[in-house]
Image (cartoon, grey):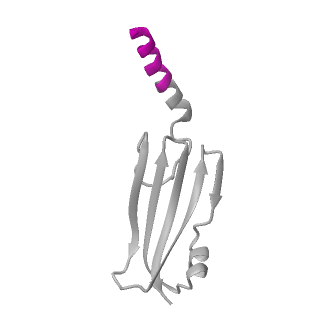
Amino acid sequence: MNRVFNFSILLVLISSLFFGNCASPGFGPRGFLYTRAKIGIFGTGEPSKRRVTSCVHSVLGLISYGDASFEFLKSRSKIQNVTETNWTTFSILGIYANLCVEISGNE
């Protein structure tokens, strides 16, 4: 029984070297098993009337998709004056990760 347990731990450690953080949000703190963080990037303190969020996704670090550019967000929401920008990162087991950009502002 002890031998099987030791082998299991060794297998987990070796596989984490190969597969750990394959999919990574790229910014902010990273947890080995799970990451969820919100990072305030920019803020003027002014009130805003509109808010929009868009995300980019990564699967195993092999496939990435999405559009979280400022141009896309501004055109989608008709925001002209950005008053606040936040990033939200999420990752689980290096299998799936995303980075969401949220902007707030006024017309």
Which quadrant holds the N terminus?
A: top left
Q: Residue 47 placed where, x, y %?
A: 36, 85
Q: Is residue 14 magenta?
A: no
Magenta-drawn stretch, dominant element (helix, strand or loop): helix
Residue 30 appearing in the image: no
- Measuring 48% from the left and 70% from the top, which residue is drawn there? 102
Question: Extreme left residue here?
Answer: 45
Residue 9 in the image: above or below residue 79: above
Q: Quadrant of residue 83?
A: bottom left
State the count of labels.
0
Q: Residue 99 placed where, x, y %?
A: 51, 59
Q: Residue 6 placed where, x, y %?
A: 42, 14
Q: Is residue 21 left or right of residue 62?
A: left
- Measuring 41% from the left and 44% from the top, which residue is drawn there? 31
Residue 16 appearing in the image: yes
- Measuring 60% from the left and 45% from the top, which residue is drawn there? 61
Residue 34 in the image: above or below residue 40: above
Q: Which residues are magenta?
A: 1-12
Q: Is residue 10 magenta?
A: yes
- Measuring 40% from the left and 73% from the top, which residue is drawn there? 42
Residue 56 in the image: above or below residue 80: above
Q: Is residue 34 left or right of residue 63?
A: left
Q: Is residue 83 left or right of residue 65?
A: left
* 27 or 90, nearer to the observer: 90
Q: Quadrant of residue 78?
A: bottom right
Residue 27 in the image: above or below residue 61: below
Question: Extreme bottom residue here?
Answer: 107
